[in-house]
Amino acid sequence: PGEAKAKAIKVAKSSKKLGEDDPRRVIHSLKVGLALTFVSFFYYSRPLYDDFGQSGMWAVLTVVVIFEFTVGGTLSKGLYRGLATLLACALGFGASNLASHFGRKGQPIVLGILVFLLVAASTFTRFFPRIKARYDYGVVIFILTFSLVCVSGYRVEKLLVLALQRLSTILVGGAICILLSFIFPVWAGEDLHKLVASNVEKLAKYLEGFGGEFFQPLEDGRNDKVSNTDKSFLRRYKNVLNSKSTEESLANLARWEPRHGRFGFRHPWKQYLKIGSLSRRCAYQIEALDAYINSHNQAPLKFRCKIQGPCTRMSIECSMALESLASAIKTMTLPSSANVHVENSKTAIKDLKIAIKTVSLDHDQDLLAIVPAATVASMIIEIVKCVESLSESVHE
Amino acid sequence: PGEAKAKAIKVAKSSKKLGEDDPRRVIHSLKVGLALTFVSFFYYSRPLYDDFGQSGMWAVLTVVVIFEFTVGGTLSKGLYRGLATLLACALGFGASNLASHFGRKGQPIVLGILVFLLVAASTFTRFFPRIKARYDYGVVIFILTFSLVCVSGYRVEKLLVLALQRLSTILVGGAICILLSFIFPVWAGEDLHKLVASNVEKLAKYLEGFGGEFFQPLEDGRNDKVSNTDKSFLRRYKNVLNSKSTEESLANLARWEPRHGRFGFRHPWKQYLKIGSLSRRCAYQIEALDAYINSHNQAPLKFRCKIQGPCTRMSIECSMALESLASAIKTMTLPSSANVHVENSKTAIKDLKIAIKTVSLDHDQDLLAIVPAATVASMIIEIVKCVESLSESVHE
């Protein structure tokens, strides 16, 4: 019992943290609960029952499958559901009519063949990458509705009435979802915006800490503990590495959302994907750089003293450039100070090159351990330039 | 009309390519068509109709939502659907019973509150990352069935009969899906196995070509065209960078699959994830390395001649080690020759270090342009060692 209690407390704590991290999650859960309660009441109330009949459950089904976390998700799913249902109903009617010409015995066979062909064909379209990415849900709904219409077409005589009932309940369910999703809305576009900005920021944070981390143990040897405790911010960039799928799905949903806040209807969401992929490239470089962060004691002291200054300056300036880019994305202004920092880091590269030139070769055996930091830093500067030009194109 | 024809031909061609790339896609589409046709016939045939009634459509619904491309996917979804439906039915009965004590007026209100609470709570659990990854589908089914049972509980008097009917149709639909998925099965585990091996292979292919690509224009200047045409194999490693989510979902599904082919029931799928993440780390390094591939003309000739030998040898040996690892994963044997290649590349590093030592500083200004290739190669060797130890642990 004590163990169970401890576990319950643990679950409660992690739920609380989950809710506190993003209160919109709690609100979303409440909204879904509300939507289903609405739909249930709709179905409970006697007068409506006669109108909607068994199809009332389609409203419940619609709410469950449509209601997504973001407004874009709910809108796109709702639209797909509506369109796919209409198309499937129309085709289903056609199929039923066609089959009815074949008499009592032929009818099920013709219907079966038609179901087989259309279902197999539409299942196959789901393997097209473009359809998979955007219309997967619509195709599933199409398959479902088409088979249902065909199946019930044979049974229920008043097919048209039934289909209209069903469509109206789906409409009711969809309308409730869409209305509720606009109360305390969660915008996929805004999430994408924040995600891209915070990813750039994470890279900046890493570069900010990198110089200190790499050259730290020069001064004293007992810094290991300190560096262990505050290393967490150095790990955060790892999230950027695998951000591709999240960004793409958010951008897909964002295109569905109406004008909201600072985002117009035709906001250039594709630009975010470009910035995202550039910051991912930058993160790959940082990942490569990170492998060297613990090799600091291998290099000869004299050489390290020479490169420490320019290297630290480069990474700090890069970090500041990225930081200003991130805040520019956030506030949707032109990144004014980023250029200055990029220029500064370029002069730091020149200083570094001069410093390397003055190195004499006798304590140069462990060249391999030092130079990568400098070279990777110079690559990051190139990437910063790309990001900069891109963020400028966003704020056109 | 000509334009439409051209478009149709284009679609037909890409469909053909899609089918030829993986014939299992065609088979899967046919299987889904077959399953739905079976279910429809099941529903058509008179004697069964009386038993299954309106719930026959639940069989259709089950097939549409359960049938997945892989065996693991179908099995897990089928199981979740069954379990979630049972649990939701039980809770729904409880809720209906509880509500019936509150009289005609109180009943819908109590039911509404119960629906609201349970739906909100279970929607919230979907935000837990662990539940999201594994049980998301089950939770959705639970929400759906619970609300439906609650809603119909108020309407339909013979709730128990209805529920049993529904469960039996779901069982029929699920059974058809699971049976069909075992005919020409698509194993998620096998796909994962192949994916991991081919990813390692892609890295090997890149390293194999890298040496030649980087040092090529030393001999003659007109090689640009050649390198442009066969560069595609150098780009393939990019797929590895974003393979994380695919690998994880495949591994999740693979755990559901029974013993098949060379894969036991408790095959160590987690090892594949480890190998996958190590090869991704390797791919990040290659991505960083790739940024230098076009910088070959910046370095002074004399220096390049010195490092060309060891560098090329390093990347070739790495490539061979990775190649032998990939084939070891494929055939599930111990990677015997990988060690030799790793040792060879280690001696190549030593050679390289000696070569660098003998460089005099007067033509060393562009040090930055050359050294990265060498350093990154040395990093890759370290990663190869990791991969090697891991693949050994897989073939325990």
Image (spheres, coloured by chain):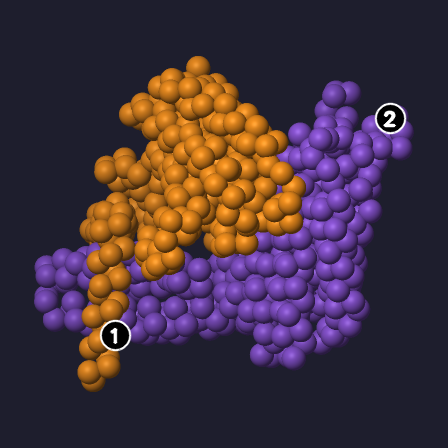
Chain colours: A purple, B orange
- The label number, if any, that marks residue B163 in the structure image: none
Left or right position of B92 against B59: right
Vertical placement of B279 versus B1: above or below?
Answer: above
In the rendered structure, the answer to whether residue B151 lies left or right of residue B200 reads: right
Q: Nearer the viewer, residue B142 or A122?
A: A122
Q: Is residue A271 visible?
A: yes
> What residue is at 52 percent from the left and 65 percent from the top?
A252
| CA–CA distance in space, label 1 to label 2 | 69 Å
The secondary structure type at the circle numbered 2 is loop
**Residue ranking furthest to the top:** B396
When the figure is inspected, residue B309 is found, relative to residue A93, above or below; the finding is above
Give the position of the C terminus of chain B as an image quadrant.
Answer: top left
Give x and y (percent) for residue A44.
Answer: 57, 62
Q: Position of residue A288 (x, y in %)?
A: 61, 42
Mark 1 vs mark 2: tell me if same chain.
no
Residue shown at 10% from the left, 67% from the top: A102
Residue type at tag 2: Gly
Occupied quadrant, residue B298: bottom right
Residue of label 2: A221
Chain under numbered label 2: A
- Which of pointers 1 and 2 indicates the residue nearer the eye? 2
Query: Label 1 belongs to which residue?
Result: B7
Label 1 is found on which chain of the structure?
A: B
Q: Residue at x 50, y 23 (%)?
A: B347
Within-10-Å neighbours for mark 1: few <14, some 14–19, many 20+: few
Query: Percent from the top left, x then y, of residue B327?
Result: 34, 28
**B162 or A264: which is nearer to us?**
A264
Name the secondary structure under disc 1. helix
Where, quadrant-wise, is the N terminus of chain B in this rendering?
bottom left
Q: Mark 1 belongs to which amino acid?
A: Lys
